[in-house]
Amino acid sequence: MEFSELIRTGRAQAELLRGPGVPPLRGTLCVTGHHLLLSSGPQATPDLWLLLLRSVDSIEKRVAGDSGTITLRCKDLRVLQLDIEGVEATLDIARSIEALSSLESVITSYPFFYRPKGLRLGDAWHFHPPEHYYKRIAREVLLRSSQPLTGPQKRRCAEDEELLRAVLAAARPGAQGFIVDTRSAQTAKQARMTGGGTESKAAYPGWKRLHRPLERGRPLQESFVRLMEACGDLEQSMDRWLSRLEGCRWLAHVKEALSTACLAAQGMEREGACILVHGTEGTDSTLLVTSLAQLILDPLSRTMAGFQELVEREWIQAGHPFQLRCAHSAFSHARPKHEAPTFLLFLDCVWQLGRQFPLSLEFGEGLLLALFEHAYASPFGTFLCNSEKERCLCEVRTRTHSLWSGLNQPKEQRKLRNPLYVLNPLAIWPSVEPQSLRLWQGLFLRWTRPPEHSEVAWEKVWQIVTEKEKTEGSQPMVSASEPQP
C-alpha cells in the first residue's frame, strides 16, 4: 500500500486555531503520509506547524457555504480547529486524516521512517539491561506475575510452589511472604471458571494473600473520558466542576494505586517481608504497583537514568500492551474493551510523588508529560507493539530510534530535569488523604487554562538555576551520584 492512495487532497488554504491565548495561523495546509503541515509561506519557516497524524484521536467535520471546518481532538489532549477553503477540499482532507491516523500495520508507522540528525539507529536500546538492576537489589524481594491457572479443578503447579518456598528460604529467618492480589476476592474466585484463580493457602505455607482491588480496563478508560469532559467545560460553576471531578473517580484511582504501592513497600521496608504482586495477566495493575513501590523505596529509581530504567523494565520489557491500551486517548468515539490509561495513571501517581516531595525526584513534570505523549503517538519506536516478542518480529530495535536516545540529548535533559533535586536516600511515603492529592493541571488542563501560580514559580526557579549555571560555567547544581545499595 502506498500512502498516496489514502491522500484524496494534498493541499488547501486553511486557518488553524490552536486554543486560548494562541494566535491563529493561516497558510497552506499539506497532507503527507504521516503529518499535517501548515506554512504561512516559503519565507515563514519558523511558523511551520507540524502534527503527527498518529496523534489524532477523533475527527469532526462540518461544512457551510463554500468552506468547512475540521476539529481534531488529539491524544495529547489538544483540541485543534482547521477552517478550510472549499467544501470538497474539507471533506477530502478529513477522509485522508481518518485513514492515515488509524493505520493498523506497525511497520508503516512513522518511527520506521524517522531519521533525526545526531542520532544513530541502535543507540540507547541497550542502555537499560535488567540484569544490572537485579544484581543491585538481590536482597529486595519484590516479585510480579499473572494469576495462577488453578481453574475449577484447583490445579497446582509444583514449580510455582517451589519457587515461592525458595524465596522465603533465601530471606531472613522467619520471613513472611505477602501475595498482593490486585483483584477483589470475588473477581479472583470467578476467574476460576475460566481457568484462572488464586493461590491455595495450603500449597503456599508462609504466604498470606491480601486483596487490594484496582480498577482496570473499561472502568478506568471511562473515568479518563469523564475527567476530560469535565475539564473541557469552561462555563460550569465551581460546585459543578468539583462534583464532576469527584464523580469521574480519577483521583480515587490515584489514591487506590498509591495506597496499594505503599502497602507493598511497607511490607518490604518495615516488616522485611517478601512481596508477590499479581492481577489477571500481570501486565497492567501489577506493573503499576511494583513500579510505584520501587519509586517509594529506591532512591536510584528516582534519578533520571533510574526512572528511565524503571519504565523500560517494568512496563516495556514486562509486556504492558501499549499498542492496545493506548490506541486511543480520551476523545475517540470507539470504546474497545482493551483500551485503558493504566500507564497514564502511573505517571499521574509519579507526579503526585513529585509534588509531595519536590526535592527527591531528579526529573520534573516535563519528563512525565513527554512519556505520556510518546506512549500514545511518537516518532520513536520505544512504545511500539504489545510485547518484546512483537518488537522482535517487527525489528523495532534495529529499524527505529529509541526514545531514550532522544530524551538524553543535553538540550532535552535541561528541560526535563528537576533543578532543585537533592539525593534522598530514604523512602518517601506519600499521603493519600483527599487534601494531599491534586488534579494534575499541567496535563489535564494545560491546553485550556492558564498555568497555576506554582507552575509559573517553578518555571522561574528553573530559569534562575539555568542562568546561574551558565554564568558560573558549572556543572548541574546537584550531581545524581549513586548511593551504595
Image (cartoon, grey):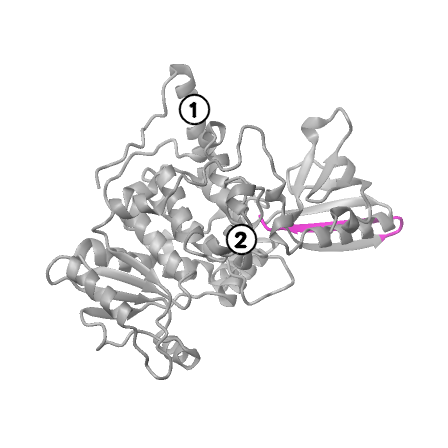
Which tag is nearer the camera, tag 1 or tag 2?
A: 2
The amino acid type found where label 1 is placed reads: Thr
Q: Is residue 430 in sight in this rendering?
A: no
Residue under pointer 2: 393
Q: Position of residue 366 (x, y in %)?
A: 47, 39
Q: Nearer the viewer, residue 363 or 393?
A: 393
Q: Position of residue 68 (x, y in %)?
A: 82, 49
In the picture provided, is 363 more to the left or to the right than 41? left
Q: Is residue 305 in sight in this rendering?
A: yes
Residue under pointer 1: 466
In the picture provided, is 349 more to the left or to the right than 163? right
Taking the spot 75% from the left edge, 48% from the top edge, the residue there is: 2
Taking the spot 70% from the left edge, 51% from the top edge, the residue there is: 100
Magenta span covers which residues?
A: 64-76
Magenta includes 68? Answer: yes
Q: Nearer the viewer, residue 366 or 286?
A: 286
User: Marks 1 and 2, Cα distance to the nearest angstrom?
Assistant: 43 Å
Q: Position of residue 39 (x, y in %)?
A: 74, 33
Residue 141, image quadrant? bottom left
